[in-house]
Image (cartoon, rainbow, N blue to C red):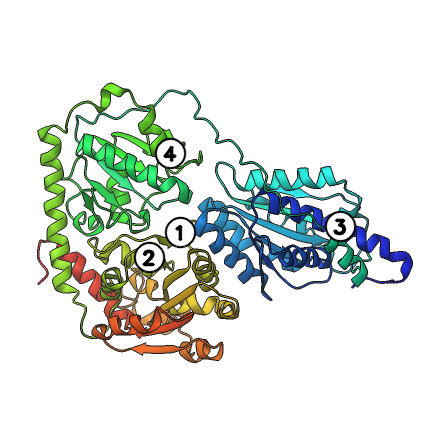
Amino acid sequence: MSGDHGPSCEPHAAANLDAAHALLLALRQLGLRRLVLCPGSRSAPLAIAAGLLEAKGEGLRLYTAIDERSAAFFALGLSRADGRPAAVITTSGTAVANLLPAAVEADHGAIPLLLLSADRPQRLKGRGANQTVNQEDFLRCSCRWAGAGADAGLAVMTPASLQALALRAWQEANGRPAGPVHLNLAFEEPLHPSAAAIAALLARTPSIRALGAQPEPSVPSEALPLLDPDQPGVIVAGPWRGAPEQWPSHLQALQRWQRRSGWPLLADGLSGLRGQPLLELVAGYDLLLEERTETLQVSQLLRLGPLPASRRLQHWIGRKSVSQLVISEGDPRDFDPLGTASHRFGHGLSAWCRALPAALWAGEPPAANLAWQRRWTALEQTVQASLSQALPASGPANEPAIARALSQLLPPQLPVMLASSSPVRDWESFAAPAGPPRALFGFRGASGIDGTLSLAAGLAESAGALVLLSGDLALLHDSNGWLWRQQLRGRLTVVLIDNGGGGIFEQLPIRSTGCLPVPPEIAAPFDFERLFAMPQRLDQGALAALHGAPVRRVARLEELEEALAWALPQPLALLELRTDRQLDAHLRRQLRASLAHGSTD
């Protein structure tokens, strides 16, 4: 807390507020629209300045959160949905450390994010002063830029230097690739201005003046990697990582290339391409590649974005010593963990297609390419027909059937977030590709379960509505996310698969009932439930209801459609489906084995 608050200290407290306000005003002029505030005393000038900017009623939306970790993930969801950076304000100390999980995900996922932390001035660092830590370094490894205010405090900075700091932070967050930026901002005491100083600042605050948009960076004139559309090939589309405004041109470019080449498209569930018209798409690759990796040979691969989650597809790609072009959307980083790419292009599929020679677009797909496409299409139709028969939307709930039913029951264009571990994998393998197109969000950059509910709340707030499909451990890991119910204006429906622990671990070969049985002599100390599954004896419905969220339990799949009709109009609701993770693991193995041999018996 600040010390002396006498009249002689008032000018410095007002200077802190003026500087904080100037910095946030500059960010607002650059395009900042959402800001999440966490509690603290050292951050008081930033908190008051944020409140004043919102009070002006010119487009800044302020949220508050008591948990910095949840706040950062909520802001990450806001940013991911529309591609515009949201900001988080925290006080000093361990509050800053709680921002790291979200910063890691923003880094891997190329999501713009602004993280603003208040700090003590440099003169107090390393001298045992309260709450002084090396917080300026906590997030550095995951940030596009780690900037700072003046060592002596933000109040000594000129308006021009504050505007320059804001501009650099905004440009770095929206760079190529986009990502998180950390601004560590020192404040000298006193921190808390008088009511008169606050009123004076509010009275002289100018109207928001939006700054001009930054010019779009040009594509360098480098050697353009080429593929031959007159020879057979395959397109593999991983999770979409581009900005929302890039999506229409990306989709048009993909449709154009497929029309010219006739190449089949293997589209990850998170690619956003399933259900899109005018695309010859294969969704069941994870199942049909089980025993066909040798017979489905290809000489060219066009890979879009990060790799899909399917290990079988990755194995198939990894065995190809062929021409492989990896195209990312404005992200120059290496998306080739297999080490098999022969060429890379980091400026997006649309830019690549525009730069191709005009002569390359002349003509139609040759007969060999169309025959190659028909072969994949026939395999896809067989897989999907078998899955529809094996996974009806009726009977007791199981995880593969839940993914398939939701993909068909949810209204068109309603976005979905898939939690890490089993939900995102089940959607990739078992969702119906003929379902309506929709935005699908998954946070597989670091593939953690951190912040699942807060991410979904941020996405719902930014997109207007969202359905989250989550397991019980992921939801419990972020139980503070239920607190967002009080501020949400978007609608969020949480579909919970409660299988009593970490269902993804049932698919590990070390599972005692799996393919590597545990010898009797170590069966007692090897407690799989305790060491891996970690079931938590907690009533998730009661926890949600405690936070004011209505709950409905769905016992059978034929009840799901009516339950969704009840839940979707609500501001925040929970649908709970109980499943058996061991039976579901057996069902997945059975489906893979039967489809590999061309049957579902």
| Viewer can see residue 576 | yes
Of badges 1 and 3, nearer the viewer stands 3
Question: Dots 1 and 2: beta carbons under 8 Å?
Answer: yes
The first of marks 4 and 2 along the sequence is: 4
Label 2 neighbour load within 10 Å: few <14, some 14-19, many 20+: many
* Image x and y of residue 335, in percent: 39, 38
Q: Mark on residue 426? A: none
Q: Position of residue 479 (x, y in %)?
A: 48, 70
Q: Residue at 26% across / 20% down in the picture?
A: 358
Q: What residue type is labelled 2?
A: Val
The span from disc 1 to disc 2 (Cα, nearest Å) is 9 Å
Q: For the residues carrying marks 2 and 3, which lies nearer the camera in this image?
A: 3
Q: Are marks 4 and 2 in contact (CB under 8 Å)?
A: no
Q: Distance between the residues labelled 4 and 2?
A: 25 Å
Q: Name the residue under label 1.
A: 444
Q: Mark 4 points at which residue?
A: 348
Residue for badge 2:
424
- Of residues 587 and 550, the one nearer the viewer is 550
Tell me which numbered mark, 4 or 3, is placed earlier along the sequence. Answer: 3
Asked whether, in this view, residue 55 is left or right of residue 563, the answer is: right
